[in-house]
Amino acid sequence: MRLAGDSPLPCGTMALSIGEFLHPLKNAGQRELILAAMYYLARYESKAEVTTADIEAALKRAKHPKARKIQYAAVLTQSVPFVQSPGTKEGRHLLWSLTGQGENRVRELLDLPEAEPEIEHDVGTLQALAAKIRDANARGYVEEAVKCLRVGALRATVVFLWTGAVATLREDVWAEGTSTIDAAIKKHNPKARTFSKKGDFAYVNDATLLQITQDLGLVDKAQKKQLEDALDLRNSCGHPTKYSPGIKKASAFVEDVVGIVWP
Protein backbone atom coordinates (compact mmCIF):
# COMPACT_ATOMS: atom_id res chain seq x y z
CA MET A 1 0.00 0.00 0.00
CA ARG A 2 1.34 3.47 -0.95
CA LEU A 3 0.16 6.95 -0.17
CA ALA A 4 -2.35 8.31 -2.67
CA GLY A 5 -0.64 9.61 -5.77
CA ASP A 6 2.72 8.25 -4.70
CA SER A 7 5.22 6.40 -6.85
CA PRO A 8 8.62 4.84 -6.13
CA LEU A 9 11.58 7.17 -6.43
CA PRO A 10 13.10 7.07 -9.92
CA CYS A 11 16.46 5.35 -10.33
CA GLY A 12 19.35 7.67 -9.67
CA THR A 13 17.32 10.19 -7.63
CA MET A 14 19.31 11.69 -4.76
CA ALA A 15 17.98 10.11 -1.58
CA LEU A 16 16.77 12.34 1.24
CA SER A 17 17.81 10.81 4.55
CA ILE A 18 15.30 10.52 7.35
CA GLY A 19 17.58 12.66 9.50
CA GLU A 20 17.37 15.48 6.96
CA PHE A 21 13.61 15.01 6.57
CA LEU A 22 12.96 15.21 10.32
CA HIS A 23 15.48 17.95 11.10
CA PRO A 24 12.88 20.79 11.04
CA LEU A 25 10.95 18.88 13.74
CA LYS A 26 13.80 18.56 16.25
CA ASN A 27 11.66 20.30 18.90
CA ALA A 28 8.33 18.74 17.91
CA GLY A 29 6.13 16.64 20.14
CA GLN A 30 6.13 12.83 20.16
CA ARG A 31 2.98 12.46 18.05
CA GLU A 32 4.31 14.81 15.36
CA LEU A 33 7.61 12.94 15.22
CA ILE A 34 5.87 9.61 14.84
CA LEU A 35 3.57 10.91 12.11
CA ALA A 36 6.51 12.42 10.21
CA ALA A 37 8.53 9.21 10.51
CA MET A 38 5.57 7.21 9.17
CA TYR A 39 5.20 9.67 6.30
CA TYR A 40 8.88 9.28 5.40
CA LEU A 41 8.71 5.48 5.54
CA ALA A 42 5.64 5.44 3.30
CA ARG A 43 6.83 8.04 0.81
CA TYR A 44 10.52 7.23 0.50
CA GLU A 45 10.79 3.57 1.51
CA SER A 46 7.41 2.23 0.31
CA LYS A 47 6.45 1.14 3.84
CA ALA A 48 2.96 2.54 4.32
CA GLU A 49 2.05 -0.09 6.94
CA VAL A 50 4.53 -0.23 9.80
CA THR A 51 4.94 -1.60 13.31
CA THR A 52 6.02 0.36 16.36
CA ALA A 53 9.44 -1.28 15.96
CA ASP A 54 9.72 0.08 12.41
CA ILE A 55 8.94 3.61 13.59
CA GLU A 56 11.38 3.41 16.49
CA ALA A 57 14.12 2.09 14.20
CA ALA A 58 13.49 4.97 11.79
CA LEU A 59 13.81 7.59 14.53
CA LYS A 60 16.99 5.93 15.79
CA ARG A 61 18.41 6.07 12.25
CA ALA A 62 17.63 9.76 12.30
CA LYS A 63 19.57 9.95 15.58
CA HIS A 64 16.71 11.84 17.15
CA PRO A 65 17.25 12.33 20.91
CA LYS A 66 13.64 11.40 21.70
CA ALA A 67 13.78 8.06 19.86
CA ARG A 68 14.37 5.96 23.00
CA LYS A 69 11.95 7.88 25.22
CA ILE A 70 8.72 7.58 23.24
CA GLN A 71 6.01 5.15 24.29
CA TYR A 72 5.17 4.28 20.68
CA ALA A 73 2.09 2.11 21.17
CA ALA A 74 0.49 4.56 23.59
CA VAL A 75 1.15 7.60 21.39
CA LEU A 76 -0.19 5.84 18.30
CA THR A 77 -3.35 4.76 20.11
CA GLN A 78 -3.95 8.39 21.04
CA SER A 79 -3.20 9.65 17.50
CA VAL A 80 -6.51 8.72 15.87
CA PRO A 81 -7.79 10.13 13.43
CA PHE A 82 -4.29 10.75 12.04
CA VAL A 83 -3.45 7.03 12.06
CA GLN A 84 -5.29 3.76 11.61
CA SER A 85 -4.51 0.10 12.13
CA PRO A 86 -5.11 -1.97 8.96
CA GLY A 87 -4.17 -5.30 10.55
CA THR A 88 -1.28 -7.21 12.03
CA LYS A 89 2.10 -8.50 10.90
CA GLU A 90 2.74 -12.20 11.38
CA GLY A 91 -0.49 -12.34 13.36
CA ARG A 92 0.94 -10.58 16.41
CA HIS A 93 2.54 -7.23 15.56
CA LEU A 94 -0.05 -4.47 15.14
CA LEU A 95 0.37 -2.52 11.92
CA TRP A 96 -0.18 1.24 11.64
CA SER A 97 -0.63 3.56 8.67
CA LEU A 98 -1.37 7.25 8.14
CA THR A 99 -4.84 8.41 7.23
CA GLY A 100 -5.46 11.27 4.82
CA GLN A 101 -5.67 13.60 7.82
CA GLY A 102 -2.32 12.25 9.00
CA GLU A 103 -0.68 12.97 5.65
CA ASN A 104 -2.10 16.49 5.64
CA ARG A 105 -0.87 17.06 9.20
CA VAL A 106 2.70 16.16 8.22
CA ARG A 107 2.51 18.38 5.16
CA GLU A 108 1.44 21.26 7.39
CA LEU A 109 4.22 20.59 9.90
CA LEU A 110 6.94 20.49 7.25
CA ASP A 111 5.37 23.03 4.89
CA LEU A 112 5.36 20.49 2.06
CA PRO A 113 3.62 21.31 -1.23
CA GLU A 114 0.35 19.62 -2.08
CA ALA A 115 1.24 19.12 -5.73
CA GLU A 116 3.28 16.12 -6.79
CA PRO A 117 5.70 13.63 -5.17
CA GLU A 118 8.50 14.88 -7.45
CA ILE A 119 8.13 18.44 -6.20
CA GLU A 120 7.92 17.36 -2.59
CA HIS A 121 11.05 15.26 -2.94
CA ASP A 122 12.94 18.05 -4.67
CA VAL A 123 11.97 20.55 -1.98
CA GLY A 124 13.48 18.22 0.62
CA THR A 125 16.58 17.62 -1.50
CA LEU A 126 17.23 21.33 -2.02
CA GLN A 127 16.56 22.18 1.62
CA ALA A 128 19.13 19.62 2.72
CA LEU A 129 21.56 20.86 0.07
CA ALA A 130 21.22 24.54 1.04
CA ALA A 131 22.08 23.70 4.64
CA LYS A 132 25.39 22.21 3.46
CA ILE A 133 26.51 24.98 1.08
CA ARG A 134 29.09 27.19 2.75
CA ASP A 135 29.18 29.96 0.18
CA ALA A 136 26.44 32.41 1.18
CA ASN A 137 25.91 33.60 -2.39
CA ALA A 138 25.29 30.14 -3.83
CA ARG A 139 23.26 29.10 -0.79
CA GLY A 140 20.98 32.12 -1.19
CA TYR A 141 20.13 31.18 -4.76
CA VAL A 142 19.34 27.58 -3.77
CA GLU A 143 17.09 28.84 -0.96
CA GLU A 144 15.29 31.07 -3.47
CA ALA A 145 14.82 28.01 -5.69
CA VAL A 146 13.17 26.20 -2.76
CA LYS A 147 10.74 29.08 -2.21
CA CYS A 148 9.78 29.06 -5.88
CA LEU A 149 9.41 25.29 -6.00
CA ARG A 150 7.07 25.31 -3.01
CA VAL A 151 4.53 27.39 -4.93
CA GLY A 152 5.00 25.58 -8.23
CA ALA A 153 6.96 28.38 -9.94
CA LEU A 154 9.02 25.95 -11.99
CA ARG A 155 10.59 28.42 -14.41
CA ALA A 156 11.85 30.56 -11.53
CA THR A 157 13.07 27.42 -9.75
CA VAL A 158 15.18 26.48 -12.77
CA VAL A 159 16.64 29.99 -13.09
CA PHE A 160 17.55 30.35 -9.41
CA LEU A 161 19.01 26.86 -9.06
CA TRP A 162 21.11 27.33 -12.20
CA THR A 163 22.43 30.65 -10.88
CA GLY A 164 23.43 28.94 -7.63
CA ALA A 165 25.14 26.20 -9.61
CA VAL A 166 27.09 28.75 -11.68
CA ALA A 167 28.17 30.54 -8.50
CA THR A 168 29.49 27.23 -7.15
CA LEU A 169 31.24 26.31 -10.41
CA ARG A 170 32.93 29.70 -10.46
CA GLU A 171 34.26 29.09 -6.95
CA ASP A 172 35.58 25.69 -8.01
CA VAL A 173 37.26 27.15 -11.09
CA TRP A 174 38.64 30.12 -9.14
CA ALA A 175 40.48 27.68 -6.87
CA GLU A 176 42.57 26.62 -9.88
CA GLY A 177 44.30 30.06 -10.08
CA THR A 178 44.04 32.98 -12.49
CA SER A 179 46.86 31.89 -14.83
CA THR A 180 45.29 28.45 -15.28
CA ILE A 181 41.85 29.95 -15.90
CA ASP A 182 43.26 32.49 -18.35
CA ALA A 183 45.04 29.78 -20.33
CA ALA A 184 41.87 27.64 -20.45
CA ILE A 185 39.80 30.57 -21.73
CA LYS A 186 42.29 31.62 -24.39
CA LYS A 187 42.59 28.05 -25.60
CA HIS A 188 39.12 28.49 -27.05
CA ASN A 189 39.15 32.25 -27.58
CA PRO A 190 42.63 33.71 -28.09
CA LYS A 191 41.17 37.22 -28.24
CA ALA A 192 39.49 36.96 -24.84
CA ARG A 193 40.45 39.61 -22.30
CA THR A 194 43.10 38.54 -19.81
CA PHE A 195 41.62 36.90 -16.72
CA SER A 196 43.33 38.34 -13.66
CA LYS A 197 40.74 38.72 -10.89
CA LYS A 198 37.53 37.12 -9.68
CA GLY A 199 35.43 39.93 -11.11
CA ASP A 200 36.52 38.89 -14.60
CA PHE A 201 34.00 36.05 -14.40
CA ALA A 202 31.45 38.70 -15.38
CA TYR A 203 32.90 38.47 -18.91
CA VAL A 204 32.84 34.66 -19.02
CA ASN A 205 29.48 33.34 -20.22
CA ASP A 206 27.98 30.14 -18.86
CA ALA A 207 28.79 28.06 -21.95
CA THR A 208 32.46 29.03 -21.73
CA LEU A 209 32.45 28.36 -18.00
CA LEU A 210 31.22 24.81 -18.64
CA GLN A 211 33.99 24.27 -21.20
CA ILE A 212 36.57 25.49 -18.69
CA THR A 213 35.27 23.14 -15.99
CA GLN A 214 35.79 20.22 -18.36
CA ASP A 215 39.24 21.42 -19.45
CA LEU A 216 40.30 21.70 -15.81
CA GLY A 217 38.97 18.23 -15.02
CA LEU A 218 36.24 19.44 -12.67
CA VAL A 219 33.59 17.64 -14.73
CA ASP A 220 33.91 14.97 -17.39
CA LYS A 221 32.53 15.03 -20.93
CA ALA A 222 29.24 13.37 -20.04
CA GLN A 223 28.66 15.67 -17.09
CA LYS A 224 29.40 18.72 -19.23
CA LYS A 225 26.81 17.54 -21.75
CA GLN A 226 24.21 17.20 -19.00
CA LEU A 227 25.02 20.69 -17.73
CA GLU A 228 24.77 22.08 -21.27
CA ASP A 229 21.28 20.58 -21.52
CA ALA A 230 20.49 22.16 -18.16
CA LEU A 231 21.74 25.51 -19.44
CA ASP A 232 19.46 25.20 -22.47
CA LEU A 233 16.50 24.66 -20.14
CA ARG A 234 17.58 27.60 -17.99
CA ASN A 235 17.70 29.82 -21.09
CA SER A 236 14.25 28.65 -22.18
CA CYS A 237 12.89 29.48 -18.72
CA GLY A 238 14.78 32.76 -18.31
CA HIS A 239 13.51 34.50 -21.42
CA PRO A 240 10.00 35.87 -22.08
CA THR A 241 8.60 32.93 -24.03
CA LYS A 242 5.50 30.77 -23.67
CA TYR A 243 7.59 27.77 -22.64
CA SER A 244 7.12 26.36 -19.15
CA PRO A 245 8.70 23.08 -18.00
CA GLY A 246 6.56 20.29 -16.63
CA ILE A 247 7.08 18.80 -13.19
CA LYS A 248 9.09 15.84 -14.44
CA LYS A 249 11.30 18.08 -16.59
CA ALA A 250 12.01 20.39 -13.66
CA SER A 251 12.65 17.44 -11.38
CA ALA A 252 15.13 15.93 -13.86
CA PHE A 253 16.86 19.32 -14.02
CA VAL A 254 17.18 19.40 -10.23
CA GLU A 255 18.52 15.84 -10.16
CA ASP A 256 21.15 16.49 -12.85
CA VAL A 257 22.37 19.84 -11.57
CA VAL A 258 22.50 18.84 -7.90
CA GLY A 259 24.14 15.50 -8.68
CA ILE A 260 26.91 17.07 -10.78
CA VAL A 261 27.58 20.41 -9.11
CA TRP A 262 27.06 19.30 -5.50
CA PRO A 263 27.79 15.54 -5.50
Image (cartoon, rainbow, N blue to C red):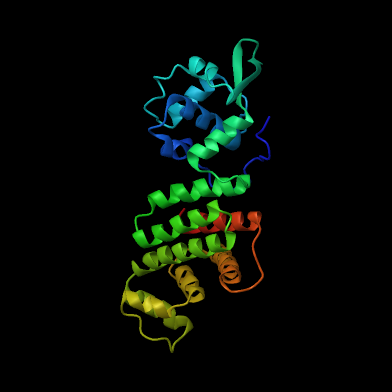
Residue 218, percent across and down? 44, 64
Residue beneath the point at 53% across and 19% down = 76
Which residue is at the front of the view, 154 or 137?
154
Q: Indicate the position of residue 70 as horizontal and vertical percent values.
A: 43, 19
Q: Compared with residue 212, is residue 54 higher up or lower down, i.e. above or below?
A: above
Q: Is residue 152 above or below residue 66?
A: below
| Residue at 42 percent of width and 39 percent of height | 24
Left or right: where 30 falls relative to 117 = left
Q: How many numbered marks, from 0 up? A: 0
Residue 17 visible in image: no
Q: Residue at x 64, y 54 (%)?
A: 247
Judged left or right of residue 122, residue 247 is right
As drawn, which residue projects farthest toward the bottom?
191
Q: Residue furthest top?
A: 92
Left or right, 253 with respect to 30, comes to right
| Residue visible at 57% across and 71% down in the picture | 235
Tell me residue 69's x, y (percent): 39, 19
Nearer to us in this view, 96 or 259: 96
**Residue 146 versus residue 200 in the image, above or below:** above
| Residue 92 picture quarter | top right
Question: In the picture shown, does residue 72 fall above or below 116?
Answer: above
Q: Does residue 87 show up?
A: yes
Q: Quadrant of the N terminus?
A: top right
Residue 64: quarter of image: top left
